[in-house]
Amino acid sequence: MSAEWQQVLQDLITLTGFSDQDKEILRTSARVTAGWADEFAQAFYDLLFSYKPTAAVFAPNERPAREVSLKGWYHDVVHGNITAEFWKEQWVVGLIHIARRVTNPYMLGMTSRVQQLFLHKCLQAFPPQQAEAVYGAFKRTTDVVAGLITEGYFQNYMLAMEHVAGFREKLIARMLDMEIHDMLREAGVQLSIEKWSLA
Ligand code: HEM
């Protein structure tokens, strides 16, 4: 696997503002938030199974196993068990999702749902200032997760294409340049700079 994921992680941490303090906040609120795991798993899969395109992702009888792993993931997040290993696993989830035809819109839609439910629960459980702090820590963490999964999906997809086609990265970038130039022209887009390249 490429080491690209570490740069992507750095970008996401810097731009979301995630910090060690978030882990601490999550850890100290876990006494309350960990108790919401069943409700989260139920809401998550009730929605996915009630919508035809996402229900079609799952094999018959797969739901219990998926609920167990979602609860494991939720447990790690709300206990602030955010290690380098945890982040790397999220990158690999992108690859797993490619194989299971879980698109990024599915994943991002569900990230939004999980965040909305978490905010709702925080507002019920904590005084406003603490609710904002706990939700903020959860939001930054899960935004970094979603960014890693999205980019892991994209980069692994590209890598597989390069391997299949036997192309080199530089050559692909030059071919993409020409293609994107054409597509921008067709879309009637005039960029604000003259020269650009992916190479
Ligand atoms: C909040 C967004 C999501 C997160 C954080 C997430 C996270 C994960 C993680 C950590 C795994 C690996 C562990 C495991 O095997 O279960 C995984 C796998 C998987 N996810 Fe997701 N996921 C998300 C959204 C979705 C959605 C929306 C779907 C379906 C529409 C989905 C379907 C799957 C499937 C089918 C697997 C593979 C299980 C296997 O074959 O081993 N995920 N996901």
Image: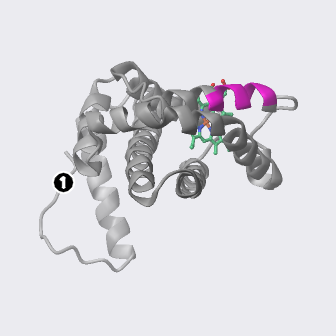
For residue 1, say whether it is visible.
no
Nearer to the camera, 29 or 41: 29
Position of 88 relative to 54 (above/below): above
Residue at disc 1, CB closer than 8 Å to ligand 1: no
Q: Quadrant of residue 88?
A: top left
Position of 45 relative to 131 (above/below): above
Position of 102 relative to 87 (above/below): below
Left or right placement of residue 67 versus residue 151 in this view = right
Mark 1 = which residue?
A: 197
**Residue 78 at x, y = what percent?**
49, 34
**Residue 43 at x, y = what percent?**
73, 48
Residue at the left extreme? 194
Magenta stretch holds residue 36: no
Question: Which quadrant of the render holds ligand 1?
Answer: top right
**Residue 86 at x, y = what percent?**
42, 24
Q: Main secondary structure of the magenta part?
A: helix
**Which residue lies at the image location 37% right of the left edge and 38% below the top edge?**
25
* Span shown in magenta: 64-71
Nearer to the camera, 153 or 61: 61
For residue 189, say whether it is visible.
yes
Q: Give the residue type that dot 1 points to.
A: Ser
**Which residue lies at the image location 58% right of the left edge and 33% below the top edge?**
34
The C terminus is located in which quarter? top left
Magenta stretch holds residue 69: yes
Nearer to the camera, 192 or 120: 120
Left or right placement of residue 126 versus residue 144 in this view = right
**Which residue lies at the image location 12% right of the left edge and 64% below the top edge?**
195
Position of 64 relative to 123 (above/below): above
- Label 1: state its secondary structure: loop
The N terminus is located in which quarter? top left
**Which residue lies at the image location 79% right of the left edge and 46% below the top edge?**
55
